[in-house]
Amino acid sequence: MRFRQRLLKSIFPQRWAEEMEADSRSWILRCQDCGLERSVWEVGDVRWKVVGSPSRYRHCPQCGHATWHTLYRQPSESPAE
Ligand SMILES: [Zn+2]
């Protein structure tokens, strides 16, 4: 877990931290070159209650270099939400 994620988890109540992690996991970064998809949480980022720029310039492990990634929110998997 990256420092920023740890920091946010340590300063927020547990419930918020869980919500933040679940929310970050529901955001997907998709490589525009090869189509590799990873959750925002997986790449070490936190995206929580933020709406904004849909594109990120990120390193893609499949392409082996930095490419543009489309950021989008995948539909929730749990019906409880
Ligand atoms: Zn790629």
Image (cartoon, grey):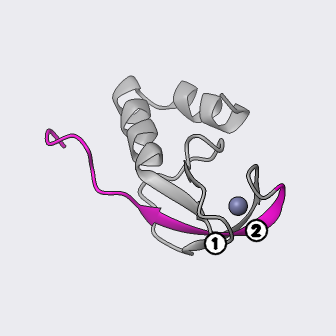
Q: Is residue 68 left or right of residue 9?
A: right
Q: In this view, does 22 lie above or below 59?
A: above
Location of the C terminus by quadrant is top left
Report the amino acid beneath label 1. Answer: Gln
Q: Which of 71 and 36 is in front in this view?
A: 36
The label number, if any, that marks residue 67 in the structure image: 2
Tell me whether circle 2 and circle 1 mark residues in contact (CB < 8 Å). Answer: yes
Q: In this view, does 7 lie above or below 60?
A: above
Residue located at (65% from left, 41% from top): 44
Q: Is mark 2 on a helix, strand or loop?
A: strand
Q: Where is residue 67 in the image (x, y as percent from the top left)?
A: 76, 68
Question: Is the CB of mark 1 within 8 Å of ligand 1?
Answer: yes
Q: What stretch is highlighted in magenta?
A: 64-81
The residue depicted at 73 percent of the width and 52 percent of the height is 62
Residue that label 1 marks = 32
Does the numbered disc 2 mark a residue whose Cβ is under 8 Å from ligand 1? yes
Q: Where is residue 2 in the image (x, y as percent from the top left)?
A: 70, 33
Measured Cα–Cα span from mark 2 to mark 1: 7 Å
In the image, is residue 48 part of the stretch drawn in magenta?
no
Is the N terminus in the top left, top right, bottom left or bottom right quadrant?
top right
Q: Give the tally of numbered discs.
A: 2
76 part of magenta stretch: yes
> Residue 49's quadrant in the figure?
bottom left
Q: Tag 1, which secondary structure?
A: loop
- What amino acid type is highlighted by mark number 2? Thr
Whether residue 77 sits left or right of residue 46 in the image: it is left
Mark 1 residue crowding within 10 angstroms, few (<14) / some (14–19) / many (20+): some
Task: For ligand 1, give the image quadrant.
Answer: bottom right
Residue at image location 40% in from the left, 49% down from the top: 26
